[in-house]
Amino acid sequence: MHDSDWIDLDRLVEDAMKCWGIPGLAIAVVQDDEVILLKGYGVRELGVNAPVTCDTQFMICSLTKSVTAAGLALLVDEQRLDWETRVREILPEFQLCDAAATEAITISDLLTHRSGLPRHDRIWSPPGERSREQILEAMRYLEPSRKLREAYQYSNLGYVVAGMVAERLSRQAWEEFTAQRLLLPLGFSNFGFSTAALESSIDHAHPYGLDGRDVYREELWPMHAAPAGGITASVEDMARWLQFLLSRGRANDKQLVSVAAVDAMMTPRVDVGDSEFAEIGRSQYGYGLESAHYRGDRSVFHTGSLPGWATLVSMLPDHGIGVVVLTNRDPCSVRELIAYAVFDRLRSLPPINWLEIFQIKRKKQLEEKAYTQGFEVPGVSALLFGEPPRDFVGEYEHPAYGCISIVQTASEARWSWRGLSGVLIYRGGDSFQLKEDGIPRYASGIPILFERNAGGLVDRLKSPLEPAVSDIVFQRQIAG
């Protein structure tokens, strides 16, 4: 790239950050095993003179999945397991709702999201803390939406189990194993495995969301499914991860992971679907990495998304080119448009105005949001509904999703569930919405419906907490 190209890229990044309300961003570009760009933009915290540096730690979110997969690749190299090893051979306590799937599911199935389970993220999502062992126990109560290996369905739970496989074989905590066997040998120096570690670091970003055009400070939610998305790292560290992947497993002139194992991670194994852009085409998933094409070149990539964070690793491995983008703002198109702009320049392709393309798309989304908000019907406090509140007061249990508690105060009906709390909003009949106090984890609220037994007594509530399966049913608990 010429000097004018770098200036042009700087301008593009700054324009995109302004358009999408991104406080801070860090980018790394690798070409032919050399880091040719390493730079921070903006601030890590609004209202504070704290610029993003190359050492600023971000949540890397689901970029963690490729790290977890690489950890298993180390164990494959050591012949301690195979990609097709059955999970129960290593974790005999592992159990799914489907007995046949329980016995047949393999490491490969976990890593390619082919377990038959949809996301079911709300069994582990914060703030209610669950250990990995508790998550594993809860999985036996989760309804599948497809048969084993029938289809790709993105699921963080598979990577939680994969992390536990590494723990069982290494006899180390996943965090300790990952640091000692991968990240430290690669030269990582500004990284961690939790939001607590992030907050304790001297140089770290703070998460932000966007409501329409208004940027607001997000909660720093913990990430309990750590092997699926819990690593924090700087862009300088992630440049090392890019170099490791592009060199097919080398670190400091040594083969840390075999070429065969890294190639296995990048090999397409299950169909994901078509991109909306012809330049990208159809994508497939491998082991912690996704594959597609960019303007005719093979691409390997993965995005990371959590409230207040958006990240991307994207590579053209046949040309030794890779890009990392880390941001402290809710997921948006900026990470992709920056990567595409870098690829266009390094491949000397006629540039596509990705900024304009994504700006048009965003404008349409904002218009649609404004239109639909005009038709929303506000609810009323649960104190005003016709039925006596005591008919609904109580505790409702699901073996995987936990306990929803309903209480009546002097002024309103309130609820609590896995560390969240708020008021009940009446929607008519036995239908309500759980509205959160403060900045909501679930911005649109959580709809619930109370149901009655033959005697007319409320004995359960249900909620569409996982859209891919039937409503999740919580049974009312009887005192004593």
Image (tube, rainbow, N blue to C red):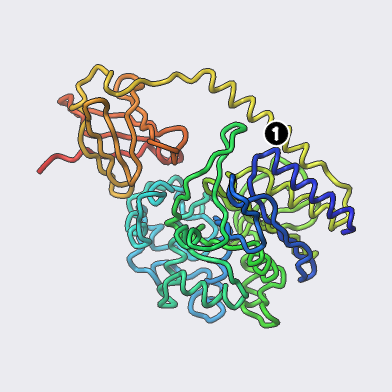
Foreground pick, 40 / 143: 40
- Residue at image position (69%, 56%) is 40
In the displayed structure, 75 sits above or below 297; it is below
Quadrant of the drawing holding the C terminus: top left
Asked whether residue 375 appears in the rendered view, the answer is yes
Q: What residue type is labelled 1?
A: Lys
- Residue at image position (87%, 53%) is 5
Residue 283: x and y, percent?
67, 51
- Residue at image position (63%, 46%) is 23
In the displayed structure, 296 sits above or below 165; it is above
Residue 318: x and y, percent?
78, 65
Q: In this view, does 331 lie to the left or right of 385?
A: right
Asked whether residue 60 appears in the rendered view, the answer is no
Q: Is residue 209 left or right of residue 157?
A: right
In the displayed structure, 450 sits above or below 35; it is above
The local secondary structure at tag 1 comes to helix
Residue linked to disc 1:
361
Residue 344: x and y, percent?
83, 52
The quarter of the displayed image where residue 391 is located: top left
